[in-house]
Structures are given as C-alpha cells and as structure tokens.
Image (spheres, helix red, strand yellow):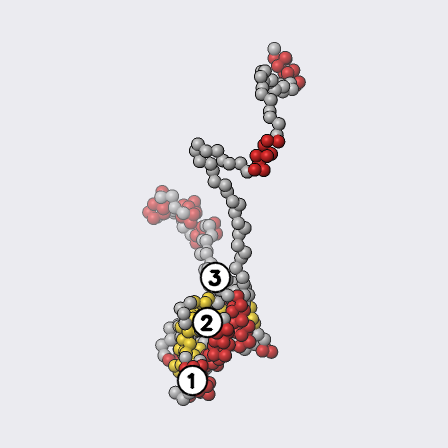
C-alpha cells in the first residue's frame, strides 16, 4: 500500500496512473490489464543500414585464412605445382629475362598458376629492353608482351628516330574488381592476365608518354595499331573514363574471340587566337604621332564654329495631367 501511495504522489507513468485511478486499496489483475491496454506503444529500434553483399571473389577474404588450404581455395591442386618449367616458360626464356613463380595464391579467386616476373626483353644485337616495374603475369600474357616489344614496338620506335631502352609499367597483378569497384567481377589484373602501360624511355633519356597529347601522334597511332592486333582488350583515353592516363592490355577470353580496341589517339587543342596588338601610351610631354591616313581624315573634316551666344536649355518635360489635377484639388 505504501508503494502505491508514493507512486501516486510522484507523478508516475501511464501504467502507475491507471493503478492510482483504480485505487491503492484494491489492485486487481483486471486493473493491470486495463493499464497495459491504455499504455502507449514502445517504439521499435531503427532498421540496420543496408550492407551490400560481398562479391564472390572476395568471400574467402572476409575470414582470415588460418591454413594454406583455406588461402589456396578448393580448386588448388598441389600435384600441379612443380619446379619444372612449362613449354611457355621455355619459349619465353629464349627472348626475355624472367623469374618463375609457380603460383600466386589468393586472396579469394585471385591469382593463378604458371606466373612469371618479366624483368627485361632481349632484342637484336645483344641488347635488352628493361620492363619497369617488372610485372607479374601469366606466362602466355608475358610472352605476348615480350613478342610485342621485340617485333612491333622496337621497330616502330626506331622508325621514329629513337632507340628503346625501357618500357614503363603502371600496374600488373592486383586482387580487385573491375575499375576498382567492389561489387563486380574480378578484374583481369586479379588473374595476372593484364598489364597497364605508361610509356617508353629512350636511350637519350627522353620519356614518351603513350597518352600525352603533345607526344608525336604518328608514333602513338602506330603503337595503337600494333597493340590492338596482339591483345584481346585494349583500353585507353576515350574508352570509359578509367584509362585516360595509361593503356590497359589483357588477354581476356570472350565468345567468338570478340576483341575490344578502344584507344582514341587525341590531338592537342588548337592554340587560342592571338591577342590584338596594343599601341603604347604616349609619354608625358609628348603627343602620339598620328597615322598619315588619320591625319588626312582629320584635315578633311570641317572646323566646328565657336559658340558665342548663351547655350539653350533643354525643353521641359511634359506635365502629367493626373498629377496636376491632384495638386489643384489639394489647393
């Protein structure tokens, strides 16, 4: 009883108010039920924010792998990992300096087998073209890149009056989605089947950027034609907005051997029109010399007569009839 008296005097909530209305002497089950029916509803918590699903190629990355088997994935075949070079390795070792990497493991579905690091490409005369930074690629992709350098890029650069010393690489193997988007298919970079090129370094230390508008257009056009023949995907300026400063190459397999070559060899914008020549202002104490034609025009103009009388004033403005009538009424 004392509890209900204190509750009524302390301005309780809706449930206690209902109990006080019933009375402190007779608290029954029906009174409690009535209080529960009249009490306001408790608000529910806000829904959790939407969390997009993890792409399939990133699922094994979510939990940190504890064993090599978890990191390698279910399709890993240990019997296929051997130090014996493949046929592609043997062909590539004759034309390039490489380091064998049997397999790149994960994360997720990234990586692959028969990976090599391409350090340099051997050309005629016992010379070599360095590849910086050395890309990690699948052997078939590395072989096509080396053949393109030997058979296409070096002769075209020589025809332009230069000698190739190094190929500058922007990126090769990286486990990520296409165009660096999380929710999407794994990029060919994640499969070590793609490389991004920046440009060439010549033996005279000149640098030739493949996407520079000021670089020689003839050489850029020739390089584009040779690349589109070798690789199944070529993306550069004008393709999708993600390849404006480098050239993306890969050997993605598509239905009916479909190929993509999207590299617009752009030209620099036209120069702005020349500004009109401004004549220098005359110095103090000197009068600017007039052109002969201007002097002749001024001599042909009649001399203005001097004003001797008073200057006439302008006509007064016309009176506003409505305003005049109002003034007259007030007066």
Is the residue marked by circle 3 packed among few (<14), some (14-19), or many (20+) residues within 10 Å? few
SS at circle 1: helix
Could you say which is closer to the camera, residue 56 or residue 210?
Answer: 210
Q: Which quadrant holds the C terminus?
A: top right
In the rendered image, is residue 5 in sight?
no
Tag in front: 1 or 3: 1
* Mark 3, residue position: 50
Sequence-wise, the earlier of marks 2 and 1 is 1
Label 3 – label 2 distance at C-alpha: 56 Å
Q: Residue furthest left?
A: 2
Could you say which is closer to the camera, residue 75 or residue 6?
Answer: 75
* Mark 2, residue position: 162
Across and down, in percent, residue 248 comes to 49, 70
Sequence-wise, the earlier of marks 1 and 3 is 3
Q: Residue at horizontal 50%, vertical 41%?
A: 279
Q: Tell how many labels.
A: 3
Q: Residue at horizontal 43%, vertical 33%?
A: 284
Could you say which is closer to the camera, residue 24 or residue 214?
Answer: 214
Tag in front: 2 or 1: 2
SS at circle 3: loop
Across and down, in percent, residue 290 comes to 53, 36
Label 1 – label 3 distance at C-alpha: 51 Å
Q: Residue at horizontal 56%, vertical 37%?
A: 292
Across and down, in percent, residue 321 comes to 66, 18
SS at circle 2: loop
Q: Left of 257 or right of it: where is 84? A: left
* Mark 1, residue position: 93
Where 28 falls versus 89 (above or below)?
above
Q: Which mark is residue 144?
A: none
Sequence-wise, the earlier of marks 3 and 2 is 3
């Amino acid at each position: 009883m004392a509890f209900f008296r204190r509750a009524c005097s302390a301005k309780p909530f809706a449930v206690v108010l209902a109990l006080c209305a019933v009375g402190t002497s007779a608290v029954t089950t029906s009174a409690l039920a009535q209080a529960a029916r009249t009490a306001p509803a408790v608000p529910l918590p806000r829904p959790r924010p939407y969390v997009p699903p993890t792409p399939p190629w990133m699922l094994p990355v979510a939990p940190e792998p504890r064993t090599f088997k978890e990191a390698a994935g279910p399709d890993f075949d240990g019997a296929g990992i051997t130090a014996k070079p493949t046929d592609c390795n043997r062909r590539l070792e004759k034309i390039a300096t490489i380091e064998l990497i049997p397999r790149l493991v994960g994360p997720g579905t990234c990586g692959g087998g028969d990976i090599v690091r391409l350090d340099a490409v051997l050309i005629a005369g016992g010379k070599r073209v360095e590849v910086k930074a050395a890309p990690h690629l699948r052997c078939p992709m590395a072989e096509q890149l080396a053949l393109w350098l030997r058979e296409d890029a070096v002769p075209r650069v020589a025809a332009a009056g230069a000698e190739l010393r190094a190929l500058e690489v922007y990126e090769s193997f990286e486990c990520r989605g296409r165009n660096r988007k999380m929710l999407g298919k794994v990029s060919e970079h994640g499969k070590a089947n793609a490389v991004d090129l920046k440009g060439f370094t010549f033996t005279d230390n000149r640098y030739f950027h493949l996407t520079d508008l000021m670089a020689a257009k003839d050489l850029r056009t020739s390089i584009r034609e040779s690349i589109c023949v070798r690789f199944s995907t070529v993306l550069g300026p004008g393709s999708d907005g993600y390849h404006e400063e480098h050239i993306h190459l890969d050997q993605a397999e598509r239905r009916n051997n479909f190929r993509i070559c999207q590299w617009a060899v752009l030209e620099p914008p036209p120069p702005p029109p020349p500004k009109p020549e401004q004549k220098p202002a005359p110095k103090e104490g000197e009068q600017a010399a007039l052109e002969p034609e201007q002097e002749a025009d001024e001599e042909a103009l009649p001399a203005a007569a001097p004003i001797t009388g008073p200057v006439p004033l302008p006509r007064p403005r016309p009176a506003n009839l409505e305003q005049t009538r109002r003034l007259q009424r007030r007066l």
